[in-house]
Image (cartoon, rainbow, N blue to C red):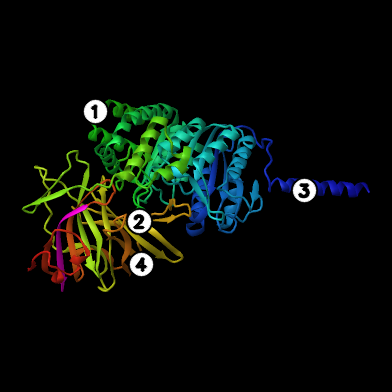
Amino acid sequence: MESKIILLLLFLLSVISSGLCDEPADNFEPVADEVDNLLAIYMIGGDLESDFQAGTYNIAEILDGYASANTSDLQIVVAYGGSKTPGWEGVTYATAEELMKDASDGVIGNEQEVSFNDPDADMGSQETLKDFLTFVNQTYPAKRTLLIFWDHGSGYEGFGLDEVYDSQLALSDIKQVLETTGTTYDFIGFDACLMGSLEVARTMEPFGKIMVASEETEPSTGWDYKSWIHAVSEDPDISSEEIGTVIVDTFMNREDSAKTLSVINLSKIPDLVQVMDNLGTKLDPYTQTSQGYRSIGKAYQIPARYGKDNRESGETSVDLKSFLEAVKDQNPDISDEVNSAISLLDEAVLYTKNDEYVSESGGLSIMSPSRITPEIYQELGDDARIASGWDAFFANLLEIAGQDTEKPVISETDETFSIDDPFGTASVYTEYYICEDDQMILIGDELLEAEEDGEYQLPDWDGKWFYLQDNLDLNNYALLGMSYDSQVPEGSLLFTSEIDLIRGTLDTAAVLDIYINPESGKNRLVATPYTIRENGEVQFSRQNLELQPNDTIYSYGWEIQEDSPDGGEWVEIGGMTVSEDTTLTYDILPDSFYAQAMYAEYDDNPGNYAGVKVFRIENGEITGVESNSTLSEETSDPEESTSGEYTNQ
């Protein structure tokens, strides 16, 4: 009888013990003595793991960096999951030692001996994050704790995307968890897109000392974990700021392009928020008039823009420093307030870098109004707020943006154009269109600068533009709807194009960034996929994909529809299969009718056209040009139009 009781007790103990791997308790006993450094990583694998094994790739780097570490100097605990990949369902906690056993066969997620596993957990929920942080904080005492969030990021719209539950952590979710667990961190990092924003820094400030995050989208390779973890293992006393600097430098050395990364001193954020509060109060009167509104709207158009796409109209955020400088240029009377904000921003940004494919960045971004309506702003709530003065200004800016439907007035005299724009708030472009089947579809635009006398002149057009061409199969080509974005530090002009990209099982909308260097003639094409979630949010992938053979792309252009409240809609204009001989070609366009025009707009609202010329291209040559005063469907066939004289060339 006694032996049966002992066996029963042993069985119950084994059940209780295994149960710890199913439901974390609220209180844990430390499993080790206090270490110098604890690295806790919350890794939502999502589609980054199921499509690209990006989580597995970074875990391998983590283990490479940890290989020579002394366990008293550094302990690592990773919570991974949130993916449809076998072994990545739910959530698993694993130490570096456990991950090394798991990785012995090259596959992460098939090891049974782990600290904890719940295959039904939702990593996009507060509860799962709270359980992990409670487990880490109580189980692994440390002199310094570094907390890393790994996955997709959307700035003020939140972090992470559990692929199984289609769930995301809002900033308010993370804030509530950090308040509940009651722990502050020496270092908080976001290896995720678009998290280097003032909204995120303001949320994290009470819970950390140093934050590392990117203003721009990130490539799937993420941070170089091997290098910076090795640096911590080699020097356990390395400062958190130095760790951040190593992360930035090694990240920028990755081969991927279009990168930013910053080290932020969170203790400086309250002062920056206070001065932004005051600045918002100063800017609020500008939202009371159309001219004032346009001067602020123009300032949002000038800075580096992050998370940008055309089909969903605009960008997630803009670089805060270059925005503030643009505000000062547009409104010199508030220079003192703006200079104070810039000075405090520079104090908060300890270290920042951007590569040559991104416009100069100041280290922190701020919400752009381009994709935000008053209703969306209200729904975002505290996640999108900075301070009461700034928030009131921004809300009023959104209100007047919806009311301003005025278009710039363009006057023409002897083939030169003037714009009634005394405050210099209009954006002016040369635009090119394809005209066929009663459609006017934008295929490209270039920024147009005024002459010294303030007049504008349309450049002579030879019928050439950029398109993708298979040089061995001239019937395999695709027109691209290319919108001018900016000039990047290495000298290239950056254009963006909307495409659908199909590669194997990947079928996604994407922004194609096209870098064209006018001096060298070299170009670079990089696609960043994105999806539109059910709630309307634009979710960018951590992928920078260069086009490769057997990719199929479909390109889109903006069809002008004068009766549409949006001014038009996106339509497919081309499709092709990429080959080894596909190049971006600048040449005479395929035979058809095309048009050139001047276009001027305030902010992103539908604008006005002038100086319209319609071109006929036949057999690779321009065979006719017609001038027209307006841009309409009637200009689709110059031979049938009566609004101007058709001239053979």
Q: Are the two marked residues, 3 and 2, in contact with CB atoms closer than 8 angstroms? A: no
- The segment highlighted magenta reads 608-620
Q: What residue did someone put label 2 on?
A: 311
Q: Position of residue 82 (x, y in %)?
A: 56, 52
Residue at the (61%, 49%) spot, across then down: 92
Quadrant of the rendered structure where residue 450 is? Answer: top left
- Structural crowding at the residue carrying mark 3, measured as other residues with C-alpha within 10 Å and reported as few (<14), some (14–19) or many (≥20): few
Query: Within the magenta stretch, is there residue 610?
Result: yes
Outermost residue, left direction?
Answer: 414
Separation of residues labelled 4 and 2 (CA atoms): 26 Å
- Whether residues under marks 3 and 1 lie with C-beta atoms below 8 angstroms apart, the answer is no
Q: Amino acid at mark 2?
A: Arg
Three-letter code for the amino acid on which mark 4 is drawn: Pro
Separation (CA) of disc 3 from disc 2: 56 Å
Residue 549: which numbered mark, if any? 4
Secondary structure found at label 1:
helix
- How many neighbours does mark 4 have within 10 angstroms: few (below 14), some (14-19), or many (20 or more)? few
Label 2: how many Cα within 10 Å (few below 14, some 14–19, many 20+): some
Question: Is residue 480 found left or right of 518 in the rendered image?
Answer: right
Residue pointed to by mark 1 = 333
Screen quadrant of the C terminus: bottom left
Is the magenta region chiefly helix, strand or loop?
A: strand
Between 81 and 441, the residue placed more toward the observer is 441
